[in-house]
Image (cartoon, rainbow, N blue to C red):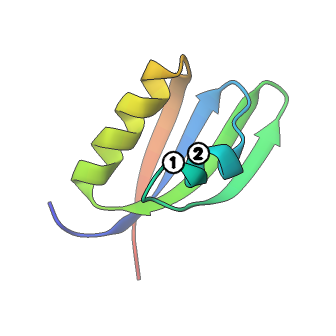
Amino acid sequence: MHDTCAYQIQLRGRLDANDLNAGSPLQIAGVRQAGEDTRLTVYADQSALVGLLRHLHGQGFLILSMQRQPHE
């Protein structure tokens, strides 16, 4: 549960990574906008990921998908 991994999250909606990074201990990397969707990469452990997903949901984002990749 304490392993840090890269998570790719796809959201419905436009996200400004600078705004999110300013208020979060997690650093969001690799934000790509495609139409109405945003795809971002975050390096986190599982508990930090759950907090981020709750935050995004609370901000009204629809989470379309999430993939985990081991962080090397």
x and y, in percent, of residue 48 in the image = 30, 52
| Three-letter code for the amino acid on which mark 1 is drawn | Gly
x 58%, y 54%: residue: 21
x 56%, y 22%: residue: 61
Q: Quadrant of residue 44?
A: bottom left
x and y, in percent, of residue 67 in the image = 45, 48
**Could you classify mark 2 by the number of other residues whose Cα lies within 10 Å: few (under 14), some (14-19), or many (20 or more)?**
some
Nearest the viewer among 69 and 31 is 31
Taking the view exactly as shown, the residue that stands out farthest to the bottom is 72
x 39%, y 35%: residue: 53
58 to 8, vertically: above or below: above
x 22%, y 50%: residue: 47
Image quadrant occupied by the N terminus: bottom left
**Could you classify mark 1 by the number of other residues whose Cα lies within 10 Å: few (under 14), some (14-19), or many (20 or more)?**
few
What numbered label is drawn on residue 10?
Answer: none
x and y, in percent, of residue 27 in the image = 53, 62
Is 58 on the left or on the right of 39, as rendered?
left
Query: Which residue position is annotated with label 2?
Result: 20
Frontmost of labels 2 and 1 is 1
Mark 2 lies on a secondary structure that is helix
Label pair 2/1, CB-CB below 8 angstroms: yes
Query: Which residue position is annotated with label 1?
Result: 23
x and y, in percent, of residue 71 in the image = 40, 75
Q: Quadrant of residue 69?
A: bottom left
| Three-letter code for the amino acid on which mark 2 is drawn | Leu
Is 30 on the left or on the right of 6, as rendered?
right
Image quadrant occupied by the C terminus: bottom left
Mark 1 lies on a secondary structure that is loop
Taking the view exactly as shown, the residue that stands out farthest to the front is 23
